[in-house]
Image: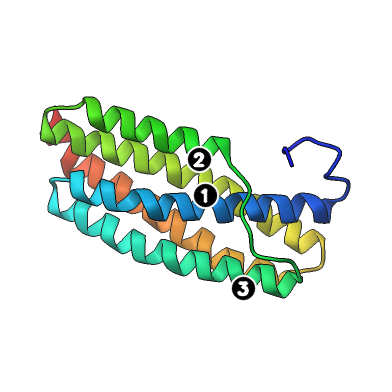
Amino acid sequence: MGFFTKDIKTLNDLFVHTLQDIYYAEQQIAKNLPDMIEKATDQTLKNGFETHLSETKDQITRLEKVFQMHGVEAKGVDCPAIDGILKEASDVAGDVDDKQVLDAALIAAAQAVEHYEITRYGTLIAWAKKLGRDDCASVLQQNLDEEKATDQKLNKLALSDVNQKAA
């Protein structure tokens, strides 16, 4: 089911589809983070990626809870957006020889992922509330809060240390 197809007729259909989208995205992120951990040379960045991998696994569990609460099967749908962001991150990381520049590139790639997740969770929360599902919105808010915190940590690390070393 594509994002703008006749299969989506109601806000509830759109909510479920987008929930499936972010579920797929989180699973792909969990698969890709170990590679980013391995490539990172800055120890703070490496530790941050390890923490985020653990958080991502928790976020997947929370999404499964939202599916259950909403009475639908937990399943993902292909998300070309996250696939593209992750492919670009892999391509860029493969092209960088200088390890300090590589760390800066990894942060930029991770922030692109975070920003995608932030938009999805914000939208899902708004729709859940509109659908009268404050219970689902509350669980999704936990994921959004973690994504925003991760983005802030990445930004702080980039500005305070990694970008300077890369320059």
User: Tag 3: residue type?
Assistant: Lys
| Closer to the camera in the image, 134 or 60 | 60
Helix, strand or loop under label 3 = helix
Residue depicted at x 49% and y 38%:
83
Residue depicted at x 70% and y 66%:
73
Residue 10 falls left or right of residue 96: right
Q: Quadrant of residue 65?
A: bottom right
Q: Are marks 2 and 1 in contact (CB under 8 Å)?
A: yes
Q: Position of residue 111 (x, y in %)?
A: 39, 42
Q: Position of residue 61 (x, y in %)?
A: 52, 70
Above or below — where is 20 with respect to 155? below
Q: Which residue is mark 3?
A: 65
Numbered label attached to residue 82: 2
Q: How many marks?
A: 3
User: Tag 1: residue type?
Assistant: Ala
Of marks 1 and 3, which one's residue comes earlier in the chain?
1
Above or below — where is 49 with respect to 79? below
Check disc 3: other Cα within 10 Å, few if <14, some if 14-19, many if 20+: some
Residue depicted at x 67% and y 66%:
137
